[in-house]
Image: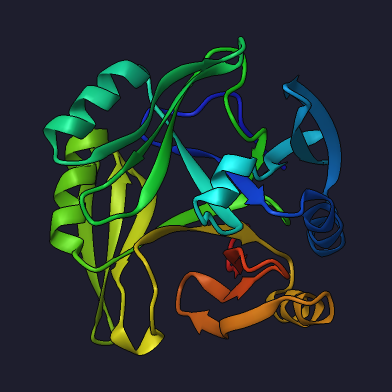
């Protein structure tokens, strides 16, 4: 089991589902990944649900707030990046041409967070840990293993994220398609690729990947549970077998059977 005790700044650390129907989402992901849940009251009759595997937290979900639904926010997966100082990171966001959607705020004694949008329109959250580092396990069946930026402008996005997190960008030609691997020091931090027009109306976004033991089996199970398969299953040489899908409420995510777990 890949247990985490801390995350280096610039590392994705937490996936979070914002759902129009949290109860339906709980049922889907428990059947798909084997998650169990703990509901944590956060005031105003709102609940934040922690998802776990074997007693180790892997992510969270919550019932979409009324104001979010009023603004047309769809059910979606959100991604958090660990930072050493959320306030300083927010200042960088503005200097680099990004937008701050939600300024820094304390989340009880767990940490300090902010939500930002890069210059190309993709949204990501910042997490300064205090008592909660993020996911306790990664790279295991049903746990976070990768994050990938889909954008219309890889140059502008690359400049933003390398400036914000100190990442370096390593471009790879994958059969005529350029895939960028962001490096956080010597470790891969995330991927990036340009949105292809053939995909239709896809907005810039950060795609969450969960590791699975059997990609094809997960695809079949997703279909049987009311989800949709958008792409795959397909093999990525040297990486694993993957698929992109949605849950029954339309939240997009990816699964991958890594060649090495």
In this rendering, position of residue 202 left or right of residue 161: right
Query: At x 30% / y 68%, what residue is drawn?
Result: 193
In this view, the residue farthest toward the top is: 109
Looking at this view, is 64 or 257 the one in front?
64
Q: Quick one: quadrant of the C terminus?
A: bottom right
Q: Measuring from the top left, give residue 21's x and y in whole percent.
A: 76, 54
In this rendering, position of residue 198 left or right of residue 108: left
Q: Is residue 139 visible?
A: no
Q: Quick one: quadrant of the N terminus?
A: top right
Count of numbered labels shown in the rendering? 0
Q: Is residue 94 above or below residue 221?
A: above
Q: Quadrant of residue 74?
A: bottom right
Q: Measuring from the top left, give residue 228's x and y in whole percent.
A: 67, 80
Q: Is residue 187 above or below residue 127?
A: below
In this view, the residue farthest toward the bottom is: 198
In this rendering, position of residue 184 left or right of residue 106: left
In this rendering, position of residue 70 left or right of residue 125: right
Looking at this view, is 89 or 116 the one in front?
116
Q: Is residue 74 visible?
A: yes
Query: At x 26% / y 18%, what residue is drawn?
Result: 88
Q: Measuring from the top left, give residue 179's x and y in whole percent.
A: 28, 69
Query: At x 76% / y 31%, what residue is drawn?
Result: 47
């Amino acid at each position: 089991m890949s247990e985490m005790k801390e995350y280096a700044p610039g590392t994705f650390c937490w996936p979070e589902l914002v759902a129009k129907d949290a109860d339906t989402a709980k049922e889907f992901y428990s059947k798909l990944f084997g998650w169990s849940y703990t509901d944590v009251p956060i005031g105003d009759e709102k609940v934040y649900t922690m998802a776990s595997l074997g007693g180790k937290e892997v992510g969270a979900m919550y019932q979409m707030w009324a104001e979010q639904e009023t603004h047309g926010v769809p059910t979606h997966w959100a991604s958090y990046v660990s930072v050493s100082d959320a306030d300083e990171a927010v200042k960088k966001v503005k200097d680099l041409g990004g937008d701050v959607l939600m300024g820094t705020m304390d989340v009880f004694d767990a940490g300090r967070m902010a939500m930002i949008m890069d210059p190309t329109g993709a949204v990501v959250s910042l997490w300064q840990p205090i008592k909660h580092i993020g996911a306790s396990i990664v790279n295991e069946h049903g746990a976070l293993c990768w994050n990938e930026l889909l954008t219309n402008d890889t140059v502008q996005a690359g400049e933003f994220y390398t400036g914000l997190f100190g990442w370096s960008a390593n471009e790879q030609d994958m059969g005529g398609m350029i895939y960028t691997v962001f490096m956080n020091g010597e470790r891969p931090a995330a991927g990036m690729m340009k949105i292809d027009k053939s995909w239709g109306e896809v907005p810039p976004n950060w795609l969450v990947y969960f590791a699975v033991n059997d990609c094809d089996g997960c695809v079949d199970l997703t279909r049987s549970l009311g989800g949709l398969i958008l792409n795959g299953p397909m093999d990525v040489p040297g990486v694993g077998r993957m698929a992109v899908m949605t849950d029954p409420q339309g939240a997009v995510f990816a699964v991958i059977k890594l060649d090495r777990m």
